[in-house]
Image: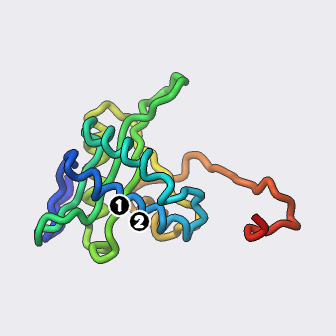
């Protein structure tokens, strides 16, 4: 496990953190809209609240707290992949990773990612997987620095023909 960045502590989230974590997830989703994410940040508060609580109870949600008062300055959610198909490996999935902008570049994201990987390994994961928006070059570089490589590529095409634009509604 890497050293915790100065001025920050990394801990398991607790149920009292849920409201703050939902707000941070909404910020993450808003940021991802700049990279063509289809998620509606505000409209997903209820399912996100349930997901956050589920991950807290299952010990798959870790927070970075600033030592200057304990405010949450980042989080990571993770868990084992659930599915109907038998696979040759057990995949640990990093679902979300977010660090507030004023704490970026200090090693907080790296510490959160490594904490999630350690938890996933303890849960029995053989490999770790995550998703990043294709045009989010900063996120992709961050994950590549941590050893992540392209495994599967998702392609998308609009159902509208070329004469319609996004604004046509």
Q: In which quarter of the image is residue 166?
A: bottom right
Quadrant for the C terminus, please: bottom right
Numbered tag placed on residue 130 in the rendering: none
Residue at position x 86%, y 64% from top?
Answer: 162
Q: Is residue 140 left or right of residue 24?
A: right
Q: What residue sits 39% from the left and 35% below the top? A: 80
- Label 2 packing within 10 angstroms: few (<14), some (14-19), many (20+): some
The picture places residue 69, in percent across and down from the top left corner, at 11, 68
Which residue sits at x=25%, y=72%? 106
Residue 164, how many percent across, how many down? 83, 66
Find residue 23 and name its label: 1
Could you tell me which secondary element the residue under label 2 belongs to? helix
The one of 57 and 20 positioned closer to us in this rendering: 20
- Position of residue 21 relative to residue 68, above or below, is above
- Kindly report the distance in space between the C-alpha atoms of the residues bearing marks 1 and 2: 6 Å
Q: Is mark 1 on a helix, strand or loop?
A: helix
Disc 1 to disc 2: CB gap under 8 Å: yes
Residue 122: give x, y in percent of width and height: 25, 35
Image location (x, y in percent) of residue 134: 58, 61
Between 50 and 95, the one nearer to me in the picture: 50
Residue found at x 15% / y 60%: 9
Q: Looking at the picture, does residue 38 appear above or below residue 136?
A: above
- Number of marks drawn: 2
Residue to which mark 2 is pinned: 27
Neighbourhood count class around disc 1 (C-alpha, 10 Å): few under 14, some 14–19, many 20 upward? some
Which quadrant of the view contains residue 50?
Answer: top left
The correct choice, above or below, for 131 with respect to 99 in the image is above
């Amino acid at each position: 496990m890497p050293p915790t960045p100065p001025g920050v502590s990394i801990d398991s989230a607790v149920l009292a953190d849920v409201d703050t974590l939902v707000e941070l997830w909404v910020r993450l989703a808003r940021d991802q809209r700049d990279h063509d994410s289809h998620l509606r940040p505000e409209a997903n508060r209820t399912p996100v609240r349930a997901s956050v609580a589920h991950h807290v109870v299952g010990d798959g949600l870790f927070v970075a707290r600033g030592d200057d008062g304990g405010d949450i300055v980042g989080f990571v959610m993770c868990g084992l992949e659930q599915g109907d198909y038998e696979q040759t490996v057990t995949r640990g999935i990093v679902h979300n990773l977010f660090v507030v902008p004023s704490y970026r570049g200090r090693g907080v994201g790296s510490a959160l990612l490594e904490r999630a990987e350690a938890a996933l390994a303890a849960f029995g994961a053989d490999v770790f997987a995550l998703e990043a928006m294709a045009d989010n070059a900063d996120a992709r570089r961050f994950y590549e620095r941590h050893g992540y490589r392209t495994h599967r590529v998702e392609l998308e095409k609009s159902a509208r023909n070329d004469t319609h634009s996004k604004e046509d509604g």
